[in-house]
């Protein structure tokens, strides 16, 4: 009824196709398996949405939505399913079994979940969901962006779902407050920008994270880093170096930060500061802090700077800032330089050198009237390592630099690369070919720190393996 069928004379008179060869059958099976991972739904017409709206309105006249909220999800779905079946029978709506099942599932998602987003949120292979108004939904899988055939009934339905998402973490989005950062219950990061700022309807962006947090071994399997490079990162994390993870949007900074935190000793007290709590630390002694927007009266705002300052009074052993964006860079450097070794943070930059410049700029824009040389000396006294994450043009993610911050020569910060990723070209499928190579530094500046933790032999072996 709602799917488009080819009923042309040419289609009806077409002769049966010959049976494919075994090799062709293997290709067909592979294509079918790949298609199964995509969002597969029949072409949906306006008639379908009209029928769904009619049944949806009739359901709301019949059911007590507040009573559903107190039920177990499966029981609530069963209740909705029963009533919708009755409405379809009473109104004599003609639907196939598959169409009726799809319609009931979507109505359940609309009432109990996040509507059309539910099938996308259930997939673990999706990294980002991008909704540009009611009729344009895009996803990112395997580093590539593609449009789906999922759509919302209208912009009002999309706005209602945005409200439902942000209200779960005590936030709001409306004309008075049209920009909102929030998170789903599983930790996925959410950004909403609503009209009148978003002209074509609400824009919703969800950065999903895998249910099972990745480890460095997984990054090695994905070829984001070499085995020897992963061992160097493990030693850097274990011997309490202060680390800045730099990278562009979608380059894997938060994933890498999660991996590095896995080498923190379980006895250490860790305090995390984030705009939207998304880090997945496995240690037992973790305090998670999250910023807060102002209330309706414009009061009660808690900034990242407030969180970083306060966590210094909470006896932290490690401070982890989800993303350094502004004046909190000064407080993080102060923390790194006053006994909180092993602190970490991420920031947006395209190279280690640019990361240092950004830190300096953020401190300057924060209103700190310090000479440039003083700020740079503070940076070199605080930051030990910069790890650069990059998303390449083929969609793959690579750790392209592991860089040490050595010190100052005059007014210039001196750095040295321990490991770099060198691209050698691309294969027939357009995938980047390259390898991680050591720069030949056999004795990095943090060697004494590694020796303090009895890790100097492992460090020497990892650097030696990286050079071969």
Image (cartoon, rainbow, N blue to C red):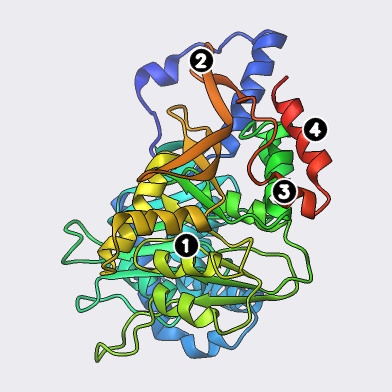
Mark 4 against mark 3, which lies toward the viewer? 3
Of marks 1 and 3, which one's residue comes earlier in the chain? 1
Mark 4 against mark 2, which lies toward the viewer? 4
Residue position marked by numbered label 1 in the rendering: 189
> Is residue 439 left or right of 116 when viewed as pictured?
right
Residue position marked by numbered label 4 in the rendering: 461
> Is residue 173 left or right of 12 when viewed as pictured?
left
Of marks 4 and 2, which one's residue comes earlier in the chain? 2
Residue position marked by numbered label 2 in the rendering: 426
User: Between residues 400 and 37, which one lies in front from this camera angle?
Assistant: 400
Q: Dot 1, how many residues are within 10 Å of its Cα: few (below 14), some (14-19), or many (20+)?
A: many
SS state under label 4:
helix
Of marks 2 and 1, which one's residue comes earlier in the chain? 1
**Spatial CA span between label 4 and label 2:** 30 Å
Mark 1 against mark 4, which lies toward the viewer? 4
- Residue occupying the far front of the picture: 410
**Spatial CA span between label 3 and label 2:** 40 Å
Work out which quarter of the rendered image holds the C terminus and state it.
top right
Residue position marked by numbered label 3 in the rendering: 448
- Which residue sits at x=51%, y=68%? 184
Measuring from the top left, give residue 45's x and y in whole percent: 33, 48
User: Between residues 253 and 444, which one lies in front from this camera angle?
Assistant: 444
Using the image, determine if residue 264 lies above or below residue 416: below
Instruction: Determine contact: label 1, label 3, CB under 8 Å.
Output: no
User: Between residues 25 and 365, which one lies in front from this camera angle?
Assistant: 365
> Is residue 281 left or right of 461 when viewed as pictured?
left
Of marks 4 and 3, which one's residue comes earlier in the chain? 3
Residue 112, visible in the rendered structure: yes
């Amino acid at each position: 009824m709602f799917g488009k069928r080819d009923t042309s004379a040419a289609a009806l008179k077409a002769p049966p196709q010959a049976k494919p060869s075994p090799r062709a059958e293997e290709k067909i099976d592979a294509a079918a398996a790949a298609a199964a991972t995509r969002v597969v739904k029949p072409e949906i017409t306006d008639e379908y949405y009209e029928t769904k709206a009619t049944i949806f309105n009739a359901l709301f006249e019949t059911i007590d939505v507040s009573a559903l909220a107190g039920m177990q999800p499966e029981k609530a779905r069963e209740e909705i399913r029963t009533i919708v079946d009755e409405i379809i029978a009473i109104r004599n709506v003609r639907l196939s079994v598959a169409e009726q099942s799809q319609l009931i599932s979507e109505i359940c998602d609309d009432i109990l979940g996040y509507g059309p987003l539910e099938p996308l949120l259930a997939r673990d292979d999706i990294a980002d969901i991008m909704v540009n108004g009611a009729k344009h939904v895009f996803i990112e899988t395997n580093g590539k962006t593609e449009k789906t055939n999922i759509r919302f009934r209208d912009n009002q339905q999309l706005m209602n779902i945005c409200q439902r998402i942000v209200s779960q973490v005590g936030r709001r989005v409306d004309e008075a407050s049209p920009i909102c950062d929030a998170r789903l219950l599983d930790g996925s990061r959410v950004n909403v920008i609503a009209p009148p700022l978003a002209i074509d309807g609400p824009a919703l962006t969800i950065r999903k994270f895998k249910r099972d947090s990745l480890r460095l071994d997984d990054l090695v399997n994905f070829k984001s880093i070499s085995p020897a490079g992963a061992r160097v990162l493990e030693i850097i994390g274990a011997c309490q170096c202060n680390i800045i993870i730099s990278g562009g949007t979608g380059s894997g900074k938060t994933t890498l930060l999660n991996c590095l935190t896995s080498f923190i000793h379980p006895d250490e007290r860790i305090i995390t500061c984030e705009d939207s709590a998304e880090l997945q630390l496995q240690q037992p002694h973790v305090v998670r802090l999250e910023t807060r927007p102002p209330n309706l009266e414009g009061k009660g705002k808690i900034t990242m700077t407030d969180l970083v300052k306060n966590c210094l009074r909470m006896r932290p052993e490690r401070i982890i800032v989800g993303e350094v964006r502004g004046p909190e860079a000064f407080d993080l450097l102060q923390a790194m330089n006053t006994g909180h070794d092993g602190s970490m943070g991420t920031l947006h930059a395209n190279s280690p050198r640019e990361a240092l410049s950004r830190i300096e700029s953020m401190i300057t824009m924060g209103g700190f009237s310090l000479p440039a040389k003083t700020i740079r000396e503070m940076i070199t006294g605080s930051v030990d390592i910069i790890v650069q994450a990059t998303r390449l043009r083929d969609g793959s993610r690579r750790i392209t630099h592991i860089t040490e911050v050595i010190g100052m020569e005059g007014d210039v910060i001196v750095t040295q690369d321990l490991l770099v990723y060198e691209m050698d070209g691309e294969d027939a499928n357009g995938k980047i070919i390259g390898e991680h190579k050591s720069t030949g530094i056999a004795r990095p500046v943090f060697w004494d720190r590694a020796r303090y933790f009895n890790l100097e032999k492992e460090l020497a072996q990892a650097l030696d393996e990286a050079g071969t």
